[in-house]
Amino acid sequence: MADRIKKSVGLYIHYVSIHVRSVMEYKTSFWLTVMGQFFMSFNVFLGIFFLFQRFHQVEGFTYQEVLLCYGIVLMEFSLAEMYARGFGEFPGMVRRGEFDRVLVRPRSAVLQVLGSKFELSRIGRMFQAVVMFFYGVFKSGVEWNFLKILTVLFMLLGGMAVFTGLFWILASLSFFTLEGLEFMNVFTHGASEYGKYPIGIYGNKILLFTTFVIPYALVQYYPLLYLLGRRTHWIYMAAPLLALLFLVPCGVLWRFGVKHYTSSGS
């Protein structure tokens, strides 16, 4: 089992290295794309900035606390979109009949799909997220200790799992329909947008939905309360780890889709 995991990780790293070498063949295009990614998310930052010029708090959260929150969410989304982009491109793979080749290869289909695309240009968005995060770290007044640093790591891990799961659902649904999948953007790109504010401000119904259905709140709102000292129970720190369970139904849906897959030809 350990040897199989090692080979799978090695193969994925090989996939990534191929994509990186390919992108670096056109360095000017790559860096222009990185800059474009940076300025796209910069517009969202400006929206937050101008809002807090008018209102000094949003449901009790300050400008610095919101930037800390949004910086973490944007990091989660950027990392997931970087390495899980293969799921996002998967509908095209099904449409072109390329998934047939994946199934006949002696490697995991999930690994091959993940390795089919690696979006290195997302480091532009990632850079802005890091800047906002560290600004929030130093200005929000959080008293940092080992447990709070661990909480941030849990948030990143759980958030990456949630967004990866959403991309995985998108890929799974393409087994049944190739049209109208744009609605999934509400849960992927949309979440990175409305996730810039603590989810609790949107009301109890949204909070319940994002706790028990699509667990954004587990990787954003609850651990944020722990970071800010508004909650002290350990469950708020560990909440992002519960979000890892979201991958289970995503995997079940994927297996169901593969089982009922019918070749679309070439």
Image (tube, grey):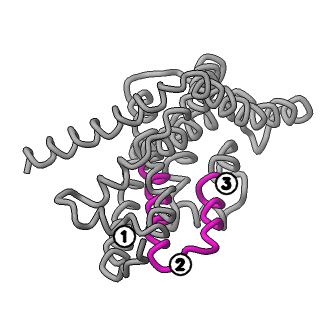
Total tally of numbered discs in the picture: 3
**Residue 57: x, y in percent?**
80, 36
SS at badge 3: helix
Mark 3 is surrounded, within 10 Å at the Cα level, by few (under 14), some (14 to 19) or many (20 or more) other residues, namely few
| Residue drawn at point x = 15 percent, y = 46 percent | 5
Amino acid type at circle 3 is Gly
SS at badge 2: loop
From the viewer's perspective, is residue 169 above or below residue 223? below
| Residue at image mark 1 | 254
| Residue drawn at point x = 75 percent, y = 30 percent | 63
SS at badge 1: helix
Front position in the image: 78 or 215:
78
The magenta stretch is: 161-190
- Tell me which label, 3 or 1, sits earlier in the chain: 3
Q: Main secondary structure of the magenta part?
A: helix
Do the residues under discs 2 and 1 have CB atoms within 8 angstroms?
no
| Residue drawn at point x = 20 percent, y = 38 percent | 10
